[in-house]
Image (cartoon, rainbow, N blue to C red):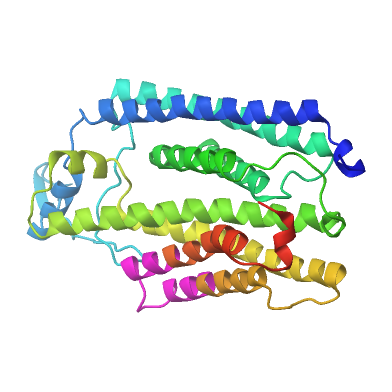
Amino acid sequence: MTLLAAATNESLADLSNKLVYASMAVYTLAFFAHITEWVFGSRSKVGRTAAALTTAAAGAAPAVQVRTKGGGTAVLDKPQVVTRSAAGSRDVPDGPGAAGGTEKGDLYGRIAVSLTVLGFLIEAAGVVSRAMSVERAPWGNMYEFSVTFSTVAVGAYLALLALKKNVRWLGLILITTVLLDLGIATTWLYTASDQLVPALHSYWLWIHVSTAIFCGAVFYIGAAGAVLYLFRDSYEAHLEAGRTPGRFRSSVMERLPSAASLDKFSYRINAAVFPLWTFTIVAGAIWAGDAWGRYWGWDPKEVWSFVTWVAYACYLHARATAGWKGRKAAYLALFAFACWIWNYYGVNILLSGKHSYAGV
């Protein structure tokens, strides 16, 4: 064992591993609680979207009662005002959420969120223990990056809930992908707690990589919103065409926000974090100048970070123009996130470059 490896606190490293596995167990319970939430929620009445589309198609307008001077009541037709979302989607109401408004569904939904909070706290403790075991930033390799990434993603979701945002519909897909991420991390990407090569011992490790993790976690939430938008938009188009979807599909789709709301959610999330991704690339260039004596060297990681930036810049530009709304913009957002995923998994595992020395 080298002198640097001897500096590792094995007790804290082992504690970190146990905490990560414990968080996976809690997240699994949260997963089943979310499943139960949707099952009980499916018993509530659905069809609000179909009713809204039917009313809009019929051109019906609510009546307005006006009291006359003689004491009688005149009934006037209220002018119909149809508002369209930025994506040009239909003017339909949001669903009530995953629980569907049922008492049992809401109960299991609250249990799921409580378990998610507990899992987040345990996983965060695992990240902190890993950092303390080597006295450095806990994202020096792919295993540490993955664990921290899932922690931040769950934390961002819980922060939105704390801000009274109606995002509980995101809980099931979030916990499912977090378990997948942690499964890959602990099975294929695991790296023993150890010190890093001298080039990575820099305060830029705290700045550059932490912002990259945060951006990726928030981009993930935006991508999840884009995926659900595509499903919801297809469902609304199905109803608008006069076709009757299956009971299960209706039960699920009626609990999601409208396509317009999901489109707006995804756009705002991606737009909010894009400036920070720009800073991430600039910070990486500055660190490269300090470590390697050049700010840009066409390293695969540098190239794909820039490709990701261009993809998101194109998405934001297209989203703000008249010709790229709705599904086209959603596809572009998913392509941009796919670039981010490739930059993380594909570039790190399949390509070699100056960033490869961090190991998996």
Answer above or below: position of 74 versus 161. Answer: below
Q: Which residue is rendered at x = 41% and y = 69% of the image? A: 332
Estimate the x, y position of residue 16 in percent, counting from the top left.
Answer: 70, 30
The secondary structure making up most of the magenta span is helix
The image quarter containing residue 301 is: bottom right
Tell me the quarter of the picture where residue 278 sits.
bottom right
Q: Nearer the viewer, residue 273 or 15?
A: 15
**Nearest the camera: 92 or 98?**
98
The magenta segment? 312-333
- Residue 167 is left or right of residue 205, and the answer is left
Q: Residue at x 77, y 56 (%)?
A: 207
Residue lying furthest right: 3
Does the rendering let one see residue 77? Answer: no
Task: Pick the quarter of the image with the N terminus.
Answer: top right
Residue 122 higher or lower than 244, as above or below: above
Residue in front for this viewpoint, 160 or 249: 249
Q: Magenta span has 183? A: no
As drawn, 120 above or below 290: above
Residue 313 lies in the magenta-colored region: yes
Q: On the picture, is 170 further left or further right than 65?
A: right
Location of residue 216 by image quarter: bottom right
Pick the front one: 245 or 54: 245
